Amino acid sequence: MTMMHVYDLIQSESFEMWHTCRSSYSEVLNLLSENAVHIFPAEQNAAYYERRLPNDLQTNVREFQPEVTALLESRERLSLFFRAFATGYIAYRNETIDGVFNQFWGYQLSGGPMVHLTNLQPGNDDTNVFGLVKAFLHGRDVRHDRQEVVGIGWPALPRALVLFEQDPQMQARSRYEEQMRGKSAGLVARIRSGGAMDAQNNAGAKPVKQQYLDLADVAELILKDACGALRA
């Protein structure tokens, strides 16, 4: 087994060849499917969303930052995160233990176990969206003091979402739209503002890093697809 440690001290954009290859990549991506251009599933899924940016979001094609591409190992599961968030299966919850009030981000289906996606927090919510998404995709309760493993039942969540979307009283379309662009309290707005799940922590933030803009666009496309599926 060989281990290689790479230190990147010079940005790729500093090399003229990078720009030459980037131009060729863009041309090839317009001609071939993402599966023909990339080998790894995460890169294929990232390219799937990247090539949709001009038509669906009226923005230029760009390559997503590595932090976003890393979340796209499974397109379905990332979609499940944003739909579960919009429908309330992922929510900020309260819990009192020995008289101490705490809060945490948790996932739970009706009648199912509570899966903690963050540790208990006695005060201000300092959760970042990337940490929350990673915890969900990992699929297991983050608490380390548990004797039994509590995990997300992946087969059950798509079924629960289908039932939710088919129930007119749940107003699934409105739930999805509330998280999309133009909604100041929505998840997409929180991501674009700096990624803090507590929107107040995004106030006065430094210029937003590109990975948050990339993830916000992926979230918008996923929610847009969810709304489109409801019309089908």
Image: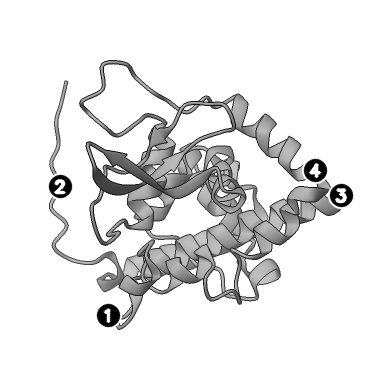
Q: Which mark is residue 232?
A: 3
Check disc 2 and give the amino acid type. Answer: Val
Q: Which residue is rendered at x = 36% and y = 53% of the image?
A: 130
Q: Secondary structure at mark 1?
A: loop
Picture coordinates of residue 156 (x, y %)? 61, 26
The residue wearing badge 2 is 6
Picture coordinates of residue 112 (x, y %)? 53, 26
Q: Which mark is residue 206?
A: 1
Check disc 4 and give the amino acid type. Answer: Asp
Viewer-proximal residue among 223 and 18:
223
> Given this view, does label 4 or label 2 mark the residue nearer the observer?
4
Q: Secondary structure at mark 2?
A: loop
Q: Which one is earlier in the sequence, the residue at label 4 or at label 2?
A: 2
- Label 1 and label 3: CA atoms lie apart by 41 Å
Q: Which one is earlier in the sequence, the residue at label 1 or at label 2?
A: 2
Q: Quick check: 142 above or below 212?
A: above
Q: Which mark is residue 167?
A: 4
- Label 3 and label 4: CA atoms lie apart by 15 Å
Give the image's coloring scheme.
Answer: one colour
- Label 2 and label 3: CA atoms lie apart by 48 Å
Labels 4 & 1 near each other (Cβ < 8 A): no
Q: Which residue is rendered at x = 42% and y = 25% of the image?
A: 151
Labels 1 & 3 near each other (Cβ < 8 A): no
- Label 4 and label 2: CA atoms lie apart by 52 Å
Labels 1 & 2 near each other (Cβ < 8 A): no
**Quadrant in which the N terminus is drawn:** top left
Residue 50 is at least partly visible in this image: no
Q: Which one is earlier in the sequence, the residue at label 1 or at label 3?
A: 1
200 lies left or right of 144: right
